[in-house]
């Protein structure tokens, strides 16, 4: 467990990966064989996620939850890739154990990052939480392998899985429609039209009959 009572907290010094920049490439051993990220499912979006350790209860619930959204993600052209610092043998044994105990087949590959190479490249190891186990990190990358979203959860709190499907829907809508999505947006809701960039456009925006205009900078439209 995270020791939040430490009197000398570790200072933040490591730079974060940047959204919209290309993710670091890597080659790794997985439960489905060796992969190089840049060559793995090159036409798909990828959700790479880390979990602290195999055979732990919160991670087990999360693996079942990732598998439960795998079909919805596949419909959206998204491949799942797990990662922890456990061995392939440990991953295989845990996946078999999840099948035995919960009747769920874990179908996505899991990286065996024994030397922490992938975990360190992506900034998954947060020493103030654990100097060995990765935190619960999620990296959403598009087919160009640009990092489009990054979500960090602490060791003790399981992630919210509907949000990852919603996040993919929002990112793909943003790309396809050239819009933004408001708070708590769900597919079918109106989207935000980018605000005008000039005074002249602002004036015109107020009269645009195609948009639901609240003010010059705040317009929505149905898609
Ligand atoms: C768990 O998955 O149950 C867990 C893993 C690391 C720290 C705390 C909980």
Image (spheres, rainbow, N blue to C red):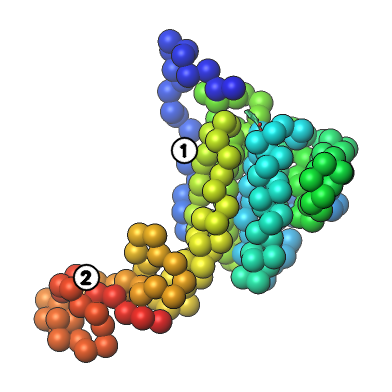
Task: Check disc 1 and report the residue beneath it.
Answer: 15
Dot 2 lies on which element?
A: strand
First in sequence: mark 2 vs mark 1:
1
Residue contact between numbered discs 2 and 1, judged by CB atoms under 8 Å: no
Q: Residue at x 55, y 35 (%)?
A: 157
Considering only vertical position in the picture, is 39 above or below 89? below
Considering only vertical position in the picture, is 123 above or below 25? above
Q: Which residue is drawn at 79% across and 45% down?
A: 102
Residue situated in front as seen by the camera: 63 or 176: 63
Image quadrant in which the C terminus is located: bottom left
- Does residue 167 appear to the left or right of 32 in the view shown? left
Task: Check disc 2 and report the residue beneath it.
Answer: 218
Q: Residue at x 82, y 50 (%)?
A: 103
Foreground: disc 2 or disc 1: 2
Pointer 1: residues within 10 angstroms few (<14), some, or many (20+)?
few
Q: Can the viewer see residue 106? A: yes
Q: Residue most toward the bottom?
A: 209
Quarter location, residue 119: top right
Q: How far apart are marks 2 and 1 (CA)?
A: 34 Å
Considering only vertical position in the picture, is 207 above or below 156? below
- Does residue 71 appear to the left or right of 203 in the view shown? right
- Tell me where residue 54 appears, x and y as whole percent: 75, 35
Q: Residue most toward the top?
A: 7
Disc sitting over residue 116 in the figure: none
Dot 1 lies on which element?
A: loop
- Tell me where residue 198 appears, x and y as whole percent: 16, 75
- Does residue 184 appear to the left or right of 1 in the view shown? left
- Tell me where residue 122 appears, x and y as whole percent: 59, 43
- Tell me where residue 120 appears, x and y as whole percent: 62, 36
């Amino acid at each position: 467990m995270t020791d939040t009572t430490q009197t000398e907290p570790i200072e933040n010094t490591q730079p974060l990966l940047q959204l919209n920049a290309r993710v670091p490439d890597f080659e790794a051993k997985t439960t489905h064989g060796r992969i190089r990220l840049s060559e793995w499912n090159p036409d798909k979006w990828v959700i790479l996620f880390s979990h602290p350790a195999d055979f732990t209860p919160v991670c087990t619930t999360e693996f079942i939850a990732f598998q439960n959204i795998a079909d919805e993600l596949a419909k959206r052209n998204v491949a799942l890739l797990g990662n922890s610092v456990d061995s392939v043998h440990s991953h295989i044994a845990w996946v078999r154990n999840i099948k035995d105990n919960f009747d769920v087949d874990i179908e996505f590959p899991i990286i065996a990052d024994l030397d922490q190479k992938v975990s360190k490249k992506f900034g998954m190891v947060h020493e103030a939480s654990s100097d060995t186990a990765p935190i619960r990190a999620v990296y959403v990358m598009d087919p160009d392998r640009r990092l489009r979203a990054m979500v960090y959860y602490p060791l003790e709190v399981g992630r919210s899985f509907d949000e990852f499907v919603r996040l993919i829907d929002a990112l793909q809508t943003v790309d396809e429609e050239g819009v933004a999505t408001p708070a708590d947006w769900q597919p079918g809701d109106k989207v935000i039209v980018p605000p005008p960039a000039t005074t002249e456009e602002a004036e015109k925006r107020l009269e645009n009959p195609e948009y639901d205009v609240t003010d010059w900078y705040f317009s929505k439209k149905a898609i």
